[in-house]
Image: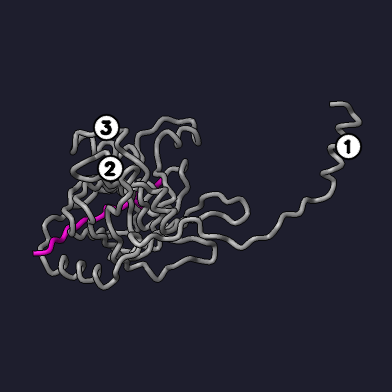
């Protein structure tokens, strides 16, 4: 490009460009199948909780465990010792090719799930796997920084990203814990582990740089969430080695910041 042409081209950009203003448009308006009858799911919750407690397990801190659910079962996950976040994976128990799709769940509901939102499966299936039915932290809402709980923004902490940040090798993440659990307990592989539902985690995006941020989880001993299985499920949960996520990835997390999570499965009689 000649100097005169270059100067002429640059001249067109001397003044700030003006862009037309538009109101936000919700790209994915909720289909009927994303809207549940609150009365129906409240009844399902009641029937399960007044039925039988069919399984109880504790996911140790910095580890992961798996369990199964039948359609209609209710799962309660409790912060039963101290503030702690968890990463959850879901598969169709009868067809493990069908698994949780965090991105589509985010599009159909929002970046953070609320009670009566649903967790959706991957393509080509695209159907509800579970429905969120109770949350002791529901009043937290969206805070002054745009932070909220239980995100489906997508990822889980992993040792590959840790190495990018620190240059150090490590085995000690939600990803590695989930891999260990599904390999040892279910005969699966690393490739079966996928993006997660981040429960009890307070996250958002900064307004100036739109970077993913976290805050210490507001979950305290005794807080819990519940969801109902909309199909037969295999579920895996990692008690995140970041604990309450008050310390950024790449910085050493003291062991006392981490706690186990309790899982209970209830079934209608």
Q: Is residue 159 magenta?
A: no
**Quarter where residue 140 is shown:** bottom left
Label at residue 8: 1
Q: Is residue 39 left or right of residue 17?
A: left
Q: Nearer the viewer, residue 94 or 31?
A: 31
Q: Is residue 267 magenta?
A: yes
Looking at the rendered image, the quarter that the C terminus falls into is bottom left
Looking at the rendered image, the quarter that the N terminus falls into is top right
Label at residue 98: 2
Q: Is residue 212 above or below residue 187?
A: below
Q: Residues within 10 Å of mark 2 (few under 14, many from 20)?
A: many
Q: Is residue 150 left or right of residue 215?
A: left
The kind of secondary structure element at disc 2 is strand
| Residue at the image position 22 percent from the left and 58 percent from the top | 75
Task: List the residue tagged with mark 3.
Answer: 189
Q: Which residues are magenta?
A: 253-269
Task: Tell me residue 73's x, y (percent).
Answer: 17, 58
| Residue at the image position 36 percent from the left and 58 percent from the top | 200
Q: Is residue 216 visible?
A: no
Q: Is residue 13 above or below residue 111?
A: above
Task: Tell me residue 236's x, y (percent).
Answer: 26, 46
What is the spatial separation of the Cα atoms under label 1 and label 2, in whole angstroms? 56 Å
Mark earlier in primary sequence (1, 2)? 1
Q: Is residue 24 above or below residue 121?
A: below
Q: Is residue 107 above or below residue 145?
A: above
Which label sits in the foreground, 3 or 1? 1
| Residue at the image position 50 percent from the left and 36 percent from the top | 165
């Amino acid at each position: 490009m000649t100097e005169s042409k270059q100067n002429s081209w640059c001249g067109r950009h001397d003044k700030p460009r003006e862009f037309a203003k538009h109101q936000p448009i919700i790209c994915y308006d909720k289909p009927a199948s994303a809207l549940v009858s609150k009365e129906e799911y409240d009844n399902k919750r009641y029937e399960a909780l007044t039925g039988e407690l069919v399984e109880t397990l504790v996911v140790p801190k910095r580890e992961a465990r798996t369990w199964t659910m039948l359609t209609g079962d209710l799962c309660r996950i409790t912060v039963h010792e101290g503030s702690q976040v968890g990463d959850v994976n879901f598969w169709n128990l009868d067809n493990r090719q069908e698994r949780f799709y965090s991105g589509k769940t985010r599009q159909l509901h929002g970046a953070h799930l609320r009670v009566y939102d649903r967790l959706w499966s991957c393509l080509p299936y695209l159907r509800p796997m579970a429905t969120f039915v109770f949350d002791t932290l529901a009043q937290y809402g969206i805070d002054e920084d745009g932070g909220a709980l239980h995100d489906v923004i997508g990822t889980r902490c992993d040792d590959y990203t840790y190495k990018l940040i620190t240059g150090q090798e490590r085995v000690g993440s939600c990803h590695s814990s989930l891999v260990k659990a599904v390999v040892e307990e279910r005969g699966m592989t690393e490739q079966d582990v996928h993006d997660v539902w981040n429960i009890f985690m307070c996250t958002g995006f900064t307004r100036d740089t739109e970077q993913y941020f976290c805050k210490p989880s507001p979950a305290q001993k005794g807080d819990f969430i519940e969801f109902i299985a909309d199909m037969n499920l295999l579920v895996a949960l990692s008690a995140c080695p970041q604990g309450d996520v008050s310390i950024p990835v790449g910085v050493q997390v003291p062991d006392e910041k981490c706690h186990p999570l309790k899982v209970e499965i209830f079934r209608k009689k």
